[in-house]
Amino acid sequence: MGASYAAKAEREIVVALAGNPNSGKTSLFNDLTGARQRVGNWPGVTVEKKEGRMVHDGTTIRVVDLPGTYSLGAYSEDEVIARNFILGGESDVVINVVDATNLERNLYLTVQLLEMGANVVVALNMSDEARARNIEIDVRRLSEFLGVPVIPTVATRNQGITELLAQALAAARNPSRKVIRVDYGREVEEELGKLEKIVASHPGLSKRYSPRWLATKLLEHDVRLLENLKHADIEELLCQADKSVKHLTEVIGEDAESIITDRRYGFISGLTRETVKRRQTAEERFTISDKIDKVVTNRYLGIPIFLAAMWAMFQFTFKLGDPMIGWVEAIFEWIGGALAGALEAEGAPRFIISLVSDGIVGGLGSVLVFIPPIFLLFFAISVLEDSGYMARAAYVMDRLMHALGLHGKSFIPLLIGFGCNVPGIMATRTLENKRDRLITILITPLMSCTARLPVYVLFAGAFFSARQGFVIFSLYILGIVLAIVVGKLLKTFVFKGEPSAFVMELPPYRVPTLKGILIHMWERGSAFIRKAGSVILGVVLLVWVLSNLPPGVEYASRESLIGRLGTLVAPIFKPAGFGTWEAAASLFFGILAKEVVVGTLGALYGVEEAGLGDAIRQHWTPLSAYAFMVMTLIYIPCVATIAAIRRETNSWGWTGFAIGYSLVLGWVMATLVFQVGRLLGLG
């Protein structure tokens, strides 16, 4: 965008003034140019064009007063003129004049300028009026969040103008053109990614426009921009844009432009929450989202409401899921019996019958019976996400995280980790600070992903059926608490330094569409089914083989290879209350995939999925069962998570640290639970 300053070194600097109507832009223009103004029209239109010249520190500056606009869309000539002037690279720097008394509305234009990649300096005008209205703006943090200089000014009194000019000249000579990145939500981001990829591959477009900005405008169906692009041979891009807009409308139930606008205002809402303090009067008008947020994000009520929401989610999951588990068990029992009967009738060898009924059907069945609660959990999570509450949950936890010295934005990957640790670790890419990113990667495996859920459901159902939801809820909370404690320790002793600034987007509340919820539930739940068809099936077969070797041993007995392996490791877990070879072997295979713990226990106890609960009750106590669930929650991440840690840290050292500390922490916590429980008479 535009020629470089070096190319204009011997020429005057061009400063464009952009801002909302009544933001004080004209006053600033008059301050800068005085009587040296020239008034005309913009080419081809009747919109007034004002420009003037001045000299500052020996540098000649041409100031162009762009038409006052609230945005840079395509709804008026004023907006198109302002946008084209900046996009055309006719200015070296843009001074964005912002009304400090109405910051939230004015920042919409600021965000659009920064998304476009303009070289911006913000003039926080009418700062005196803001102070008079008890509006306190943290200018330093606002500048950090936006990534550009922010200078308080009072244009009518010529205050702050000298510093503003100095910053503008510095920015003109060393343009940063930082492109701010608003998170438009998973669905929109996926479609933006497809469009950005096509734009980036088109030399003509990628040279002229920021790929992300152009992709966003295409989703907004910017008619003026489409007219400019009609000769650019972009049939593939337009075709993808139509598909993306249609997909978003179907899934979310709103047009893409509205979704993007809402998310921008959500970003700005989060930005002002972090930087502005004000005493609001009773006459001030609140939106419905504001009214809900006053309760949901309240300093004292926010965390209790978050905990209540999580508790309700687990109650919904397991109260509805329990009967469904019984139906799936019955189906697998029937399949296993039917296949075994058919094979016997055909005279198949005993080991083939065992492989099919005990290995494949029994092993897979013991894991797949948990499909109902897993899908119900994803249903509940999708409702919370699509309604806008999950962003508030992150905002509420942000305060706690900051109080503990952790990065507030770290809570987002941790939330994602509830579904699966692997995308949670991938989501740490949104953290700019390397230290914050490493800490978040190391503590994300402490989040209870859905792979652990089958283990919780099995043991909680066997020993705590009356309080199943509460017991599982306690494990999720334990994971969060441990993540915070470990993060604090890492921050204090290993990664010292202040957390970097960030903005938590707060999109408006909306009623989720059933179609959108079902799509999200299926996308995540089907991943579990695919995993069952690949990794889990492979591990189940491996367990069956190890349970039958060496030849001649009783299936899954202590004398089998898996029995010998479990016997070797079992003493380590005796202080934790589950020092049996079956428990040790299941934890060993759980490193491959946590879901496999249940399948392995089913194979080792030699029972179908329907009888696994009874077998567990014969070999465990409620206390040792809870200690085992704690161990499953904390100990070594699964191989997929280990691979993600290695890829994201690019370090075998940090990967080894993640494995080592989680193994030690898991053993210590499980032992603490068991030993303290015994002291309290619970064993």
Image (cartoon, grey):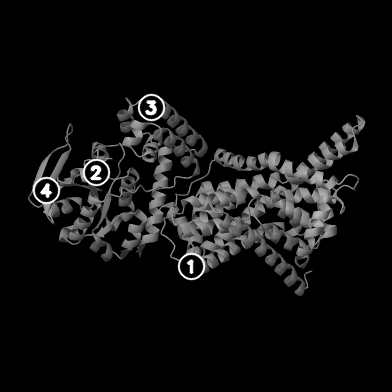
Whichever of callouts 2 and 3 sits on the residue coming sooner in the sequence is: 2
Task: Name the amino acid type tagged 3.
Answer: Ile
Residue 66 pos. (x, y %): 20, 44
**Secondary structure beneath disc 1?**
helix
Q: Residue furthest left?
A: 35
Front position among marks 4 and 2:
2
- Disc 2 marks a residue whose amino acid type is Ser
Q: Which residue is mark 3?
A: 234
Q: CA distance from mark 4 to mark 1?
A: 50 Å
Badge 1 amino acid: Ala
Can residue 381 be seen from the camera position used here? yes
Residue drawn 47% across the image and 45% down it = 185
Residue 96 appearing in the image: no
Q: Residues within 10 Å of mark 2 (few under 14, many from 20)?
A: some
Q: Residue at x 45, y 33 (%)?
A: 245
Distance CA(mark 3)–CA(mark 4): 41 Å
How far apart are labels 4 and 2 at the CA level?
Answer: 20 Å
The one of 249 and 401 positioned closer to us in this rendering = 401
**Is 524 placed above or below 434 here?**
above
Mark on residue 403? 1
Q: Amino acid at mark 4?
A: Arg
Nearest to viewer (mark 1 / mark 2)? 2
Residue extending farthest to the bottom is 679
Q: CA distance from mark 1 to mark 3?
A: 50 Å
Residue where numbered disc 4 is placed: 53
In the image, which disc is placed on residue 4?
Answer: 2
User: In whole angstroms, how far apart are the C-alphas of marks 1 and 2?
Assistant: 44 Å
Foreground: 124 or 232? 232
